[in-house]
C-alpha cells in the first residue's frame, strides 16, 4: 500500500501562508478525511476548516474564492466517498454550535445546515410538528439532506421546506 502523497507540495510556502493568514485557529493543512466519513475511508484534504460562526465562514469562503481554491462542505459524511489520493482545496465542517442550532419559529422549525437530521426530527416531534417523519433513519445533517433532497419514494425534504438561507461561492 502506498502512502498518500502530500497534496500541498504544489504550492510554495508563501501562497499557503496567504491562504491561512487570519484563519490559523480554524484551518489545518493536509488533514485526513477518513475520520469524518461514515466508511472511514479517504485521503487528506489540502485544508480542513472548522469555522465557529457564519461571519467566519463567509470570510473563509471569500478568501478561498480570491485564491482560486475550491470549497466543499462536509456534513455527516454519510453519502460521500473520498479518494485515497486526497482532495485539493478546502473542506469545511459545520460542527460549531452556530451551524447546529434548532429552534421553533411559530408552526415551523428553523435549523442550521450543520444540525444533525435526527436531532431536527426529534425536535419536531417534541414540539408537536409533523412532516419530517419520512426522514427517520436517514443519516447526516440538515444541510446535506437539503442539498440532496433526501427522502423516500413517497416524500422528500423539499416538500416540507419553506425557505433556506445559503452562502454563495463568493462568500455572500
Image (cartoon, helix red, strand yellow):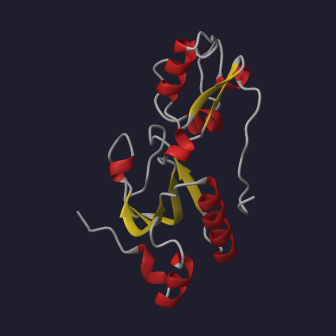
Q: Could you tell me residue 93's position as x and y percent?
A: 49, 52
Q: Could you tell me residue 41's position as x and y percent?
A: 34, 49
The quarter in which the N terminus is drawn is bottom left
Q: Is residue 146 left or right of residue 84?
A: right
Q: Quadrant of residue 114?
A: top right
Q: Is residue 10 left or right of residue 159?
A: left
Residue 104 visible in image: yes
Q: Is residue 3 left or right of residue 6?
A: left
Count of picture labels: 0
Q: Nearer the viewer, residue 126 or 86?
A: 126
Q: Could you tell me residue 110's position as x and y percent?
A: 65, 30
- Which residue sits at x=49%, y=19%? 122
The quarter in which the C terminus is drawn is bottom right
Residue 41 lies, with reference to residue 59, above or below; the image says: above
- Which residue sits at x=69%, y=75%? 66
Q: Nearer the viewer, residue 94 or 107?
A: 107
Q: Nearer the viewer, residue 57 or 86?
A: 57
- Which residue sits at x=56%, y=78%? 19
Residue 41 lies, with reference to residue 64, above or below; the image says: above
Residue 41 visible in image: no
Residue 102 lies, with reference to residue 36, above or below; the image says: above
Q: Quadrant of residue 104?
A: top right
Farthest left residue in view: 1
- Which residue sits at x=62%, y=53%? 54
Q: Could you tell me residue 91's position as x and y percent?
A: 51, 58
Amino acid at each position: 500500500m502506498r502512502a498518500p502523497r502530500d497534496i500541498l507540495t504544489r504550492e510554495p510556502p508563501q501562497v499557503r501562508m496567504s491562504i491561512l493568514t487570519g484563519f490559523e485557529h480554524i484551518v489545518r493543512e493536509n488533514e485526513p478525511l477518513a475520520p469524518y466519513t461514515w466508511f472511514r475511508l479517504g485521503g487528506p484534504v489540502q485544508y480542513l476548516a472548522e469555522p465557529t460562526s457564519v461571519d467566519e465562514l463567509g470570510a473563509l469562503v471569500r478568501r478561498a474564492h480570491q485564491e482560486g481554491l475550491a470549497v466543499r462542505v462536509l456534513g455527516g459524511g454519510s453519502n460521500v466517498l473520498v479518494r485515497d489520493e486526497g482532495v485539493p482545496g478546502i473542506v469545511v465542517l459545520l460542527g460549531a454550535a452556530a451551524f447546529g442550532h434548532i429552534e421553533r419559529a411559530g408552526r415551523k422549525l428553523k435549523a442550521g445546515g450543520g444540525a444533525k437530521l435526527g436531532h431536527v426530527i426529534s425536535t419536531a416531534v417534541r414540539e408537536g410538528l409533523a412532516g419530517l417523519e419520512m426522514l427517520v433513519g436517514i443519516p447526516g445533517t440538515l444541510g446535506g439532506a437539503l442539498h440532496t433532497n433526501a427522502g423516500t419514494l413517497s416524500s422528500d425534504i423539499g416538500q416540507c421546506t419553506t425557505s433556506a438561507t445559503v452562502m454563495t461561492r463568493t462568500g455572500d
